[in-house]
Amino acid sequence: MDDEVFRALADPSRRRLLDLLNARNGQTLRELCAELDMARQSVSKHLAVLESANLITTVWRGREKLHHLNAEPINAIADRWIHQYDRRRVQLLADLKTSLETPMDDFVYTTYIRTTPERLWQALTDPAFTEQYWKLHHETDWKPGSPMVWHQGDVAIDGPDQVVVEHTPYTRLSYKWHHITREFADSVGLSDEVYEQTSREPLSTAVFELEPVDGQVKLTVTHTGFEPDSVIRTMIQDGWPALLSDLKSLLETTVPA
């Protein structure tokens, strides 16, 4: 996968496409073509290379196909190779990594995990699994519309409209992101100011999409529904990559019971 990423980044037109998505994420092919002096077919081919390298993720909204940056390959390269680079190259790679993680309206992140859809689904929904890498679990029957209670240590997080949105086993899971309660804020050390800001924000929505690919599972997490200048949006920007890295490590390094 590293070779694909480096090859994809070697082309200036593809780097330009990443720049355009960095400036405004979630663009359609038509919007990207309008910014480039290039035939639509050529842009499509460049986007296909970027998607193959996992540098972009596509999401359908109605009849429109939206393109989003995906920082996971850059994170992986940094983790694997950063110690082999001199200080100047490390800084260049860090700048690129930071650029690809610049906060956008929607958060979209894709990773590939060497596991099965069944086991990944269990890791996303089974309290025994979520406690291992997330240090929390959800209390729900997982039926669409059913309420969810988030349990983090001794703290129970509950509230109106905190519900399951979609539950299609081994394929797609979605739920409303939890309320920021006083108890939760105290448990994670949020300041009074941050608590006041985040507790007023509307609930957002997290979506998990699972797709088997060559002995792995492609997991795409899409988190949407943020207000402009959302504080929660900035909080999940680093939280999701770290959490998904822990999930990937757990599934790839433990033997199924």
Image: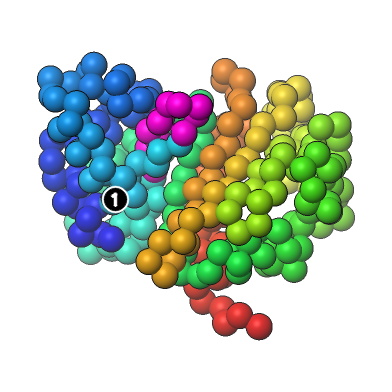
The stretch of residues the image draws in magenta is: 60-70
Towards the viewer: 46 or 9: 46
Q: Is residue 98 magenta?
A: no
Residue 148 placed where, x, y %?
A: 82, 45
In-image side of 207 versus 201 (left or right): left
Residue type, mark 1 in image: Ser
Tell me which residue sits at (77%, 35%) in the image: 180
Towards the viewer: 5 or 79: 5
Q: Which residue is mark 1?
A: 52
Q: Quadrant of residue 189?
A: top right
116 versus 187 height, above or below: below
Residue at disc 1, secondary structure: helix
In-image side of 102 versus 195 (left or right): left
170 versus 41 height, above or below: below
Tell me which residue sits at (53%, 45%) in the image: 221
Q: Is residue 67 magenta?
A: yes
Q: Quadrant of residue 163?
A: top right
Q: Is residue 218 visible?
A: yes
In-image side of 209 versus 32 (left or right): right
Residue 249 placed where, x, y %?
A: 51, 68
Residue 60 placed where, x, y %?
A: 46, 33
Q: Main secondary structure of the magenta part?
A: strand
Residue placed furthest toward the front: 63
Q: Is residue 94 visible?
A: no
